[in-house]
Amino acid sequence: MRHELITDAVLVKNYIDGDESSLSVLIHRHKQKIYSFIYSKVFDRDVTEDVFQDTFIKVIKTLKLGKYNEEGKFLPWVMRIAHNLVIDYFRKNNRMPKFDNSGEFSIFSVLGDQALNAEKQLIKDQVECDLRRLIEELPEDQKDVLVMRMYQDMSFKEISERTGVSINTALGRMRYALINLRKVIDKNNIILTN
């Protein structure tokens, strides 16, 4: 049977049963999506490579220990691992992630949402309100890309189609938007965490 016809769930089972090649099929199948996801958070190829490697080291360990029980949900599970490793990277380096899974601007993914008590929720709402105000001050083209990416969860391919510019241009605008936001935040001494 050709590999591309085998579902993720079967490949996972085959790997657990000792077929090493099944893992490389899974990695090959999902590499682009996972890699792009990590890169969209860290904007650094070396860091992306490291997190990508660490993600699959964790995947292998979990599978080898027989602790995988995500019925047929291999990709979302790997994405969650990657997302957690990105947060770990930012924690270690005292940098804040740019957004979390939902595409929302999140300084708070590092705080752990379950820890948000009423006071933190108020601060969170205030910060998001401040951020929206700051975003309004960005140049139109940067603001459009930022809003599409963060609030509408559009991919850069979709943004490129919607705005009629290349994916690279959309990425560049996003990057400048984040740089400009950070400048405004620094200039106004806005504290985004409590």
Image: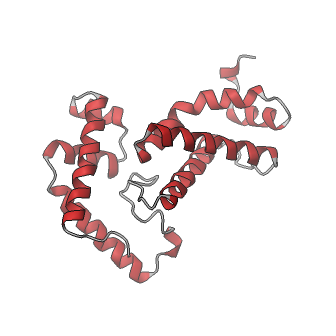
Q: Locate residue 107 relative to residue 56 in the image: left or right.
A: left
Exactly how many numbered labels are in the figure?
Answer: 0
| Residue drawn at (79%, 34%) of the image | 15
Q: Which residue is situated farthest in the bottom direction here?
A: 119
Q: Position of residue 72 (x, y in %)?
A: 68, 41
Q: Position of residue 14 (x, y in %)?
A: 80, 32
Q: Locate residue 129 relative to residue 20 in the image: left or right.
A: left
| Relative to 142, residue 99 above or below | below
46 or 16, nearer to the observer: 46
| Residue drawn at (40%, 78%) of the image | 120
* Quadrant for the C terminus in the image: bottom left
| Residue drawn at (45%, 41%) of the image | 39
Q: Position of residue 36 (x, y in %)?
A: 46, 37
| Relative to 160, residue 120 above or below | below
| Relative to 105, residue 159 above or below | above
Q: Position of residue 102 (x, y in %)?
A: 43, 53
* Quadrant for the N terminus in the image: top right
| Residue drawn at (56%, 52%) of the image | 85
| Relative to 79, residue 114 above or below | below
